[in-house]
């Protein structure tokens, strides 16, 4: 057995333009630098690449990379089946291909590759085709601070369309395994209902059946979908979604029991989804800020945590306080490499400005725990912000809409 093995599989129809883009080998994809990051975690990133080439439908493609630099990560992937079975990227490539073969709306996989060391997965990636005017459902929900989904009529339309799309998927024998909103694409401007929803990023929990998906697997998918709704604070619409999913005009006793079970399974999942939503808000904000600064003059750089708090204390909008109860924000910023010092500050926001608050508060409305260098990279919209988020992490709990407003004030 070879100590090191790199392997790449490409749809033959795409080999020509991939080669022209310099992405026709594992090594080239892994060193390719994409600056339009769509998602990021400790072990993966996703970035979008626009291409002015008629052979690339949608005018863009996405590269998703799974990176396991430490042996502990590689061993963990082994227990998830990546040594004897397919890598995560290969699993997704084959699963999406099968979904499309069954006539389901799934993104088209273009290529996957993997780099293994003595059988352990070191890195793996998936390239998928972009879709014109499409965005993930979570990004749509966050757009303009959630204005779109505050429209009851529009929310009702999407509940029906999504319910029908998931019903079709389950009747075709596909359990997605990660049916959170971030893994569902929508086209807000497309008037063809059959084209408005598409699926991506199936999880290893996903299963393919020869007949309709068993009830237990269907409940798991529905719970993940519902967890995202709860994380966004959207509880209305689930009955309408389930009526469309069950293809009925009125929920019977069995349907109401299904709803009860789904919500019970979803509530524990919603906490992690709120954390993901918070990071998504940061990523979307960073992308917009970076684009603006490429056009305009960069803003003032904040060089320390003390300077950040000073900036907030000085920043005050015009007008009188708008909130009857101040919102409390706790920052726990880790500083220093050799000696880890934590700066713990509590701020109060009254709707127009920020001020120091009593540090004894036990239950702030928002808590942000982050490495200092990563936080400075975020608030200054530096090019290394994404890599620092992945390497050093950020933990956010509480009302993430407060964070969105705070970052807007800093990035103004």
Image (spheres, rainbow, N blue to C red):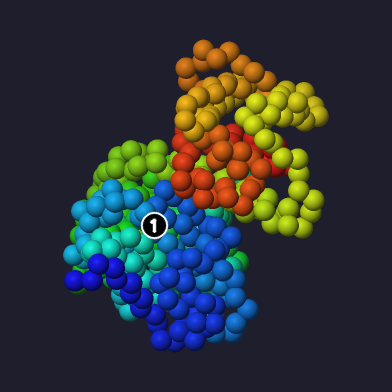
Residue 329 against residue 15 in the figure, above or below: above
Q: Residue at x 68, y 50 (%)?
A: 289
Count of numbered tags: 1
Q: Position of residue 189 (x, y in %)?
A: 60, 66
Image point (51%, 67%), residue name: 32
Residue 337 in view, yes or no: yes
Q: Quadrant of the N terminus?
A: bottom left
Picture coordinates of residue 381 (x, y %)?
64, 47
Quadrant assignment, res 326? top right
183 horizontally vs 307: left or right: left
Q: Is residue 123 above or below residue 211?
A: above
Which residue is at the front of the view, 399 or 46? Answer: 46
Q: Position of residue 143 (x, y in %)?
A: 60, 51
The residue positioned 39% from the left and 41% from the top of the image is 272
Q: State the image coordinates of residue 389 (x, y, percent, origin top left).
A: 50, 45
Say which residue label 1 marks.
Answer: 67
Q: Is residue 322 visible?
A: no
The relative height of residue 398 versus residue 187 in the rendered view (above or below) is above
The image quadrant of residue 188 is bottom right
Figure quadrant of residue 300 = top right
Is residue 99 shown left or right of residue 21? left
- Left or right of 162 on screen, residue 330: right
Quadrant location of the C terminus in the rendered image: top right
10 Å neighbourhood of mark 1: few (<14), some, or many (≥20)? many
Q: Is residue 152 left or right of residue 167?
A: right
């Amino acid at each position: 057995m070879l100590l090191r093995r790199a392997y790449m599989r490409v749809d033959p129809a795409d080999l020509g333009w991939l080669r022209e883009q310099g992405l026709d080998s594992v090594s080239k994809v892994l060193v390719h630098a994409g600056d339009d990051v769509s998602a990021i975690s400790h072990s993966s990133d996703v970035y979008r690449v626009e291409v002015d080439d008629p052979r690339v439908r949608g005018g863009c493609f996405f590269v998703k990379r799974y990176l396991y630099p430490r042996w502990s990560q590689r061993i963990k992937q082994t227990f998830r089946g990546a040594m004897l079975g397919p890598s995560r990227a290969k699993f997704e490539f084959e699963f999406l291909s099968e979904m499309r073969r069954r006539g389901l709306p799934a993104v088209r996989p273009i290529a996957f590759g993997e780099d293994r060391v003595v059988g352990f997965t070191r890195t793996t990636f998936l390239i998928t085709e972009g879709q014109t005017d499409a965005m993930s459902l979570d990004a749509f929900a966050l757009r303009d601070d959630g204005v779109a989904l505050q429209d009851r009529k529009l929310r009702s339309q999407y509940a029906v369309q999504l319910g029908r799309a998931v019903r079709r998927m389950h009747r075709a024998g596909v359990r997605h395994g990660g049916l959170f909103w971030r893994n569902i694409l929508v086209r807000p401007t497309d008037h063809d209902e059959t084209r408005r929803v598409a699926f991506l990023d199936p999880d290893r929990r996903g299963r393919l059946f020869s007949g309709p998906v068993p009830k237990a697997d269907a409940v798991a998918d529905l719970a993940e979908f519902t967890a995202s709704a709860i994380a966004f604070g959207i509880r209305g619409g689930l009955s309408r979604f389930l009526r469309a999913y069950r293809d009925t005009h009125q929920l019977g006793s069995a349907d109401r029991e299904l709803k009860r079970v789904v919500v019970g399974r979803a509530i524990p999942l919603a906490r992690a989804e709120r954390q993901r939503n918070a990071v998504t808000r940061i990523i979307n904000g960073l992308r917009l800020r970076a684009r603006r600064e490429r056009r305009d003059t960069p803003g003032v750089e904040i060089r320390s945590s003390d300077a950040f708090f000073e900036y907030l204390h000085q920043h005050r909008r015009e007008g009188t306080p708008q909130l009857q109860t101040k919102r409390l924000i706790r920052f726990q910023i880790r500083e220093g490499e050799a000696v880890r010092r934590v700066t713990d500050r509590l701020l109060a926001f009254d709707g127009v400005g920020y001020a120091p608050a009593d540090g004894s508060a036990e239950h702030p409305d928002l808590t942000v725990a982050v490495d200092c260098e990563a936080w400075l990279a975020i608030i200054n919209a530096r090019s290394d912000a994404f890599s620092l988020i992945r390497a050093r992490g950020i933990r956010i709990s509480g009302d993430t809409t407060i964070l969105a407003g705070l970052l807007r004030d800093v990035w103004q």
